Amino acid sequence: MKIPQGFERAINFSLLDSIFSRRSRRFGLGMEIPEGNLAYSSAHDPVPLSELEEAFLIWAGTGTTGLSLGDLPRTGISWLFQWTGRSWPCSCNSHSTELFYTNDDGVYMVRLFDFIPPDTSIFMSLDREKQLEKIVELFRASRITLENQRADLPKGEPGLFDFNAWNTNKPGTTFFVPVTNTTVEYMVLLFIYFGAKYGFNIIDELNGGRSCGLDKWIEKGYIRNDVRLSLFDLELRVLTTLNVEQAFISQNMNLALQALGLGGWTFTGLLPHYALGVDPSHKGLGFRFVQPEESLRSTNPPYPVGRDGVFESLCPPYVADMSEAVDRFLEVRGQFWNEGNPFPYRDPASILRDEYHPSEVRIQIVKDFCTYVYENYGRFPAFLDPMFVRLVFQAHHLDLEFYDKYFEKDSYHDLHKEHFKLWHPEIEDPFGK
């Protein structure tokens, strides 16, 4: 593969340079701010990102990089969900956030959850040309085409704040939506909290402070009644454990923007349910929404459970009940622990010779808790979305003339100025004069 000059420059652009030059740069080619003190209409047509630019951004943001090390004592290893290492850290290595994106040509998912890398490091031993080839190879292998046109997202309120409507998901942009399956990490934490060492009692403050399906396990001594955690607090812990994943991905891509000489930014102005498709007038990412029939909650809005056949949460309608959901969780986890899989250790048979899987009693405790939540709230989780979105991210080619007109020097750097020469020598450089 021919290596563009831009790739070499991006690889050699230091981490500190990316951090110190990081800015939200929102005005791209073909865009317009119609009124106000920064009113401006771009004199140039939009130019979409190349496949190579998108691959670089995505692999920096969320790509698989090798096997996680699992350098933990036995009790720590036993809670690991899987062994895949990504470009961002994750509690218990569940990695249940996947990246969706759209451009002028379609809507895509980068599916990496079930990919098991063969080696401890994918890239360390490769030269620059082989690194680039590997990024593109893995990117193409993990990319799933969902639609053959740009995503139908809101173009204003409701759904998209008006101050974001002028440049969001416009022609030439690549628009990214990290989506987190909260049910995976939720169950990981349940097996920890209900394990023999902890035995937390989860109580439901909306149901008179009763235990969440755990009474018989308290009587039998498997759950401690003196260590209590409310259902609110439990799900807040799940949320705060997971919402950083989308921030990690977005920040990784933000730093990669600087090295590529592209514009873009991370924001929250696209409301999550609208991004996923709750509004019939905008398909969004085409996720299925479910309406609870009965619930202890005072309001029962529809909630997103997944994109059918592509990215499905561990709850109905994708399983018959929450007992089956727990079985499926254990089945998926077990696939990552198969004896024939690659592991990072020199002698995995010796290090992993102990039993690292939960007992039948602990499995039933988790099933009873999950069943209680679903039967009393008509959904699982009780308060969190099974498919959770908070941050979105956009990348585009900058219109430097806008920044030259309104801003002091150093509002962009040399890689922005030289971008077309470095990455698109076949295109006339709009700023080459």
Image (spheres, helix red, strand yellow):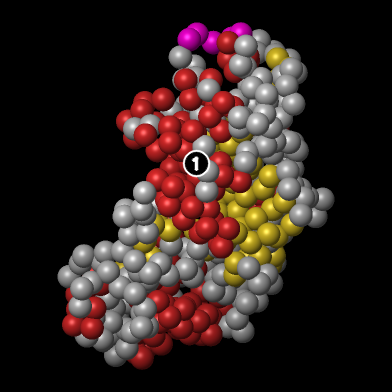
In the rendered image, the vertical position of residue 128 relative to residue 351, given as above or below: above
Q: Is residue 180 visible?
A: no
The magenta segment: 405-409
Residue at 26% across, 64% down: 69
- The amino acid at mark 1 is Ile
Q: Is residue 408 magenta?
A: yes
User: Relative to residue 237, is residue 300 drawn left or right?
Assistant: right
Main SS of the magenta segment?
A: loop
Residue at 49% across, 33% down: 6
From the viewer's side, name the closer residue of 385 and 113.
113
User: Relative to residue 399, is residue 323 drawn left or right?
Assistant: left
Q: Is residue 306 visible?
A: yes
User: Relative to residue 73, is residue 96 drawn left or right?
Assistant: right
Residue at 40% across, 45% down: 128
| Residue 320, x across and y down, in percent | 61, 84
Q: Residues within 10 Å of mark 1 (few under 14, many from 20)?
A: few
Q: Residue furthest front?
A: 2
In the picture of the structure, the residue carrying the numbered disc 1 is 3
| Residue 248, x across and y down, in percent | 42, 46
Q: Is residue 6 magenta?
A: no
Q: Secondary structure at mark 1?
A: loop
Where is residue 308, by image quadrant? bottom right
| Residue 179, x across and y down, in percent | 55, 56
From the viewer's side, name the closer residue of 148 and 334.
148
